[in-house]
Image (tube, helix red, strand yellow):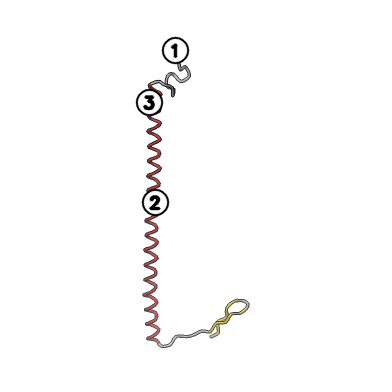
Amino acid sequence: MINANLTSGGFGAGGSFWGSIKRVIALFATFVVGALVLMAAGVVAIATAIVGLIIAFVAMFMRFGAYRRSSARTEYEAEQGEGVVLEARRTARGWKVDG
């Protein structure tokens, strides 16, 4: 009995040589797409880590910068004498500052 594949011109996914080549190419394409997805996930993970390190560095810089600035402000106030003290009290509409 002869098995003829008349619909695809012999290039179908049957047991022919071209069907085998087609399956190998499909398998290779699947591996390539999977590798690209893994590479993209790696790039996203590295970019996220870099952004996290930048945020941590800026937070540390702001913290240490604010600490130095407040000590400099305290020294300036000590040189000028006592600062102005305002009194505040809570009212029904919010805070009221007296002074």
Sequence-wise first label, 3 or 2 = 3
Q: Amino acid at mark 3?
A: Ile
Of labels 1 and 2, the one closer to you: 1
Question: CA gap, disc 1 to disc 2?
Answer: 56 Å
User: Are the residues tagged 1 and 2 within 8 Å (C-beta)?
Assistant: no
Residue, disc 2: 45
Specify the quadrant of the image occupied by residue 34.
top left
Residue 28 lies, in percent from the top left, at 37, 33
Q: Amino acid at mark 1?
A: Ile
Sequence-wise first label, 1 or 3 = 1
Residue, disc 3: 21
Specify few, some or many for label 1: CA neighbours under 10 Å numbering under 14, 14-19, or 20 or more.
few
Sequence-wise first label, 1 or 2 = 1
Residue 56 lies, in percent from the top left, at 38, 62
Residue, disc 1: 2
Of labels 1 and 3, the one closer to you: 1
Specify few, some or many for label 2: CA neighbours under 10 Å numbering under 14, 14-19, or 20 or more.
few
Question: CA gap, disc 3 to disc 2?
Answer: 36 Å
Residue 63 lies, in percent from the top left, at 39, 70
